[in-house]
Image: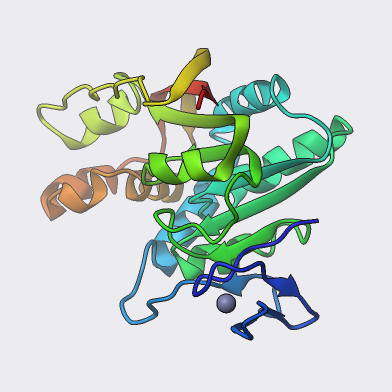
């Protein structure tokens, strides 16, 4: 079973009971919850804070995005093989990570499942979900894993890091991602803004990858409490760009029906 590499010298880290160490004696503590912090710069605060992590956890745990999870599982099913190594790159609080791992296990596919995220709060929260996940605090732009160590890399609403996906994937490895389509959360945006705009849809091409599977998830969901509406809104990129007066419009809503609209795409590395 593989593990992370040393963020300082890039040698393999060997896991011991309470720490992991490379051959050059760089040593990193493994937390009581089982994750390791491999972020080299500890000075600034990074990634989602505790409030954001808890909002996301609250919303996702209620299953509103199960249609997306199910479609991700369909994509995984078509490429995963027994004893595959999977990395969730920017895994957040591991709702997708843990559920996809469990889905594979239920289908008798063993996986060596890794997750990294720059937010310590997110990894702390995710570490409680499943002890089998190997989790580290780290950046998606300098991932502490060996070259050609992964069969599948996932990136779900995390910063895009193509060069690292290329480096980490084995020959013919797969990259799976999801992104919002034009009608995603239209009714939520309409409740906030006088003049909402449709999402711009991302360009599908990625250099040195070929698109092998693409599907769309388009459903209406009913969000049942104001807390859940506020949690969802805080997960969006609009949250930080919206005025207090506009945010207050949401505080009066007890429920909301809104479209969710995603594209899920699987790519194969072709170099
Ligand atoms: Zn080292």
Q: Quadrant of ligand 1?
A: bottom right
Residue shown at 31%/77% (left/top)?
Answer: 44
Colour scheme employed for the rendering of this structure: rainbow
Relative image position of residue 90 (x, y in whole percent)? 48, 51
Above or below, 161 against 261 in this view is below
**Which residue is found at the position 60% from the left and 55% from the top?**
146
Where residue 26 sits, quadrant-wise, is: bottom right
Left or right, 72 with reference to 254: right
Residue 123 horizontal/vertical position (percent): 56, 64
| Residue 86 vertical placement versus 141 (above, below) | above
- Residue depicted at 43% across the width and 60% down the height: 139
Q: Is residue 257 visible?
A: no
Query: Hey, which residue is sitting farthest right in the picture?
Result: 108
As drawn, 26 above or below 149 = below
Residue 208 in percent (x, y) is at 42, 26
Of 89 and 224, which appears nearest the observer? 89
Taking the spot 16% from the left edge, 48% from the top edge, the residue there is: 242
The foreground one among 248 and 93 is 93
Q: Nearer the viewer, residue 55 or 204?
A: 204
Residue closer to the observer: 227 or 172: 172
Q: Which quadrant is the N terminus positioned in? A: bottom right
User: What is the count of numbered marks?
Assistant: 0
Q: Dividing the picture into quarters, in which one does residue 136 lie?
A: bottom right
Does 203 appear above or below 233? above
Q: In the picture provided, is 34 more to the left or to the right than 270?
A: right
């Amino acid at each position: 079973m593989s593990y992370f590499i040393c963020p300082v010298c890039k040698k393999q880290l060997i896991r011991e009971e309470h720490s992991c160490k490379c051959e050059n004696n760089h040593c990193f503590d493994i937390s009581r919850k089982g994750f390791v912090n491999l972020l080299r710069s500890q000075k600034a605060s990074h990634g989602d804070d505790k409030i954001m992590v808890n909002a996301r956890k609250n919303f996702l745990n209620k299953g509103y995005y199960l249609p997306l999870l199910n479609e991700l599982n369909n994509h995984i099913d078509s490429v995963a093989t027994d004893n595959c190594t999977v990395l969730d790159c920017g895994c957040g609080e591991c709702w997708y990570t843990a559920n996809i791992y469990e889905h594979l296990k239920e289908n008798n596919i063993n996986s060596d499942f890794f997750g990294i995220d720059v937010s310590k709060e997110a990894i702390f929260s995710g570490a409680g979900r499943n002890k089998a996940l190997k989790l580290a605090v780290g950046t998606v732009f300098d991932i502490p894993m060996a070259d050609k160590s992964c069969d599948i890399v996932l990136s779900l609403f995390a910063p895009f890091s193509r060069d690292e996906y290329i480096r980490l994937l084995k020959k013919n490895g797969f990259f799976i991602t999801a992104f919002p389509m034009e009608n995603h959360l239209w009714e939520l945006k309409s409740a906030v803004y006088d003049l909402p705009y449709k999402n711009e849809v991302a360009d599908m091409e990625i250099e040195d990858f070929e698109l092998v599977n693409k599907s769309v998830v388009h459903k209406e969901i009913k969000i049942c409490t104001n807390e859940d509406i506020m949690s969802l809104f805080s997960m969006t990129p609009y949250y930080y760009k919206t005025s207090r007066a506009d945010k207050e419009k949401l505080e009066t809503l007890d429920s909301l029906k809104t479209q969710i609209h995603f594209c899920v795409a699987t790519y194969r590395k072709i170099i």
